[in-house]
Amino acid sequence: MTDPVFVDLSTAPPPEGSAPAHGAPVPPITFDGPAGYPDEVIEQLTAEALPIIARYPQARSALLPLLHLVQSHDGRLTRAGIEFCAAQLDLTPAQVASVATFYSMYRRTPTGEYLVGVCTNTLCATLGGDEILRSVCEHLGVEPGDTTADHRITVEHVECNAACDFAPVVMVNWEFFDDQTPESTIELIEDLRAGVEVTPARGTGPVRSFRETERDLAGARPPLVEPAPSAPPLVQPPPPLAEPSPPLVEPAPSEARSRVEATSQPPSPLVEPAPSPLVEPAPSAARSRVEATSQPPQPDPEPEPPETPILSRHWDEPQSWTLDNYLRHNGYRALSTALTTPPDDIIETVKASGLRGRGGAGFPVGMKWSFIPQQDSTQTDPSVPHYLVVNADESEPGTCKDMPLMLASPHTLVEGVIIAAYAIRAHHAFIYVRGEVASVLRRLRTAVDEAYAAGYLGTDILGSGFDLELVVHAGAGAYICGEETALLDSLEGRRGQPRLRPPFPAVAGLYASPTVVNNVESIASVPAIIRNGVDWFRSMGTEKSPGFTLYSLSGHVTRPGQYEAPLGVSLRQLLDRAGGVRAGHELKFWTPGGSSTPLLTPEHLDVPLDYEGVGAAGSMLGTKALQIFDETTCVVGAVLRWTEFYEHESCGKCTPCREGTYWLVQLLHRLEHEGGTAADLDTLADVTNSIVGKSFCALGDGAGSPIVSSLKYFRDEYLAHLDHGCPFDHSRSTVWAGGVR
């Protein structure tokens, strides 16, 4: 056992405003306003709250939506709002306040009609987000977090907003405004102040007020009727990148798999009966439109593509998100097939396909499903329900694949949810969506409503006897909720903090019941597998990483966006399709799977982008978030921003992460802005080593990954910061430096 190392980190105090004084007393958190609402307000809010609470098997799960609801009434959280939520859910005000203060979307100060958030995470900051925020604040005469004197505009910086492919991004009431500059953002703000109707780049209509948007997040109103788009969608499906690989040798078959493999193709879809009666709340506009017309006959099957794109094949079509459009492209045919197949055979089909989780860890999806206690098991208690939870809390910096999928083709996810729930014998499913994407929530809720109206959700689906209730649940701003057990705690109406495992969610997950948690893309890939079979899916990708996937390409690249390709494609191939690194520049470093994966360099351009290839190169495939940085980018500055993100998003549960990320920020800030000594680099490595592998969950490992890898590949650049701070001109890395990217 080695002697303990004592590190002096007090040689320079933290810069003013960068962080609170460590160890200083923290003032108590309070909520202002009266202690209660007038009777008429309570009556109104109660009428809106009760249907929200009724969606959940346990009432406390409605806490986050109810907090959104009271925030929509007051423009912030007040004492009265806290008391109301406590009374509705039989909680104490302290329990409600403890949850409310954990999430960044809940505000304790008055908020203007429009909340303008400028992303200043690494990628947006590198491409110009810092300059946008500075210019906006100077123009309005406010500081970040302040509201203008006319109470119209509140400005703040935000962390990653899952739109890195269109960076720099500004959000207005959690709606996307892409490819911004200081001038365009100031013009946008002046339009808002003048009462001009503005429409986001990707959305479901004009920007709504802060309070109206909060009502949407709460689910207090039905989904909006969307107008026909005036221009084609921004997301374009890329051309195929590689020839399909030959089918692979499959593992030894189980009894269920033998039944699956007995036929070369899935059975023909059933003729769909008329929609069954619904057991849902009052119909929305979307459902009324569907029910007003008789269900059209399903068109003839569309030929299935032998290669990518698969998921993104129809994203560029007008109103691609509608049920009618989805049905034209084999929509819900896989569901008809699945409902005539034993659930165990569905699990074995997905297991045999080799589909691996697309959320970061790459765990086999079918194997995760098989961990759920099966109906014929002697260990199974039939009174204990099973649950399916879809992790749509896309928050990993650089990752921006799930949001466009849900915007462009939400029914792909809905159909996958129904099939997965049927396979694991769940009758209640949830899609947990990050709250900061209001348009995605509206689009998804509209799709769910259409599915109910068409008989694909609810009771006796397609006459099969299978029932399923599906709830779209809005989060409230916490990166840690991307960790599956923290997500479950959040869904139960608690602070989103990771759980100790075992027990694993398959044994004791949501409400202590067997639960499967899968990523959006993982579930959305299932219908195509059921329609086309195992061999078709395994004809793409590599032996251990079969199939197709979405790669998020962002940063200093000519055409950033979502590129669907077989697993195993290289960054060089993707860059060829994306027009290469921006003109006049060259690749310096990149992330293969978001900020929590070790950095790679140009020498890794030909590494196969699958789980095994990237792992062999010393990194992780993760979420396939390929952030591209050219030679104008300061590595130390980039790593500092990522580390600030992890410090901000640490849930505080464990000491290594809570304390370690704080000190990492201080060290990196000193190196970037003031200089330092060679000993600081050793200290940086020591503190990082105290976090990696020692934190309660993987957030600590993610915080350490860019530091360890950047010291490995760019130590000379760290040394160049000593004594004088950063030698880079950060303005050269912006998108407007030297023209278009």
Image (cartoon, grey):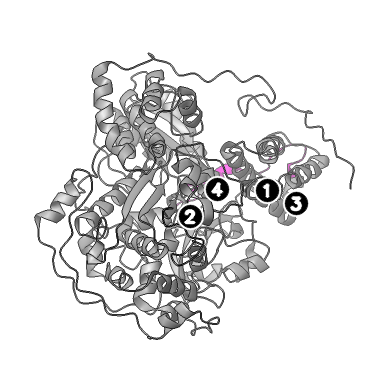
Q: Nearer the viewer, mark 1 or mark 3?
A: 1
Q: Nearer the viewer, mark 1 or mark 2?
A: 2
On the image, numbered disc 3 is attached to which residue? 715
Q: Which residues are the magenta region?
A: 720-741
Q: Real-space Cα distance between discs 1 and 3?
A: 15 Å
Of residue 180 and residue 690, the one placed in the foreground of this image is 690
Q: Nearer the viewer, mark 4 or mark 3?
A: 3
| Image spot of residue 56 (x, y percent) | 35, 43
On the image, numbered disc 1 is attached to which residue? 704
Q: Residues within 10 Å of mark 1 (few under 14, many from 20)?
A: many
Pick whichever of labels 4 and 2 is earlier in the sequence. 2
Reply above or below: 194 against 549. Answer: above
On the image, numbered disc 2 is attached to which residue? 514
Q: For residue 723: magenta? A: yes
Q: Residue 732's mark? A: none
SS assignment at label 2 = loop
Of residue 447 and residue 162, the one placed in the foreground of this image is 447
Pick whichever of labels 4 and 3 is earlier in the sequence. 3
Of residue 427 and residue 571, the one placed in the foreground of this image is 427
Q: Amino acid at mark 2?
A: Pro
Q: Real-space Cα distance between discs 1 and 4?
A: 24 Å
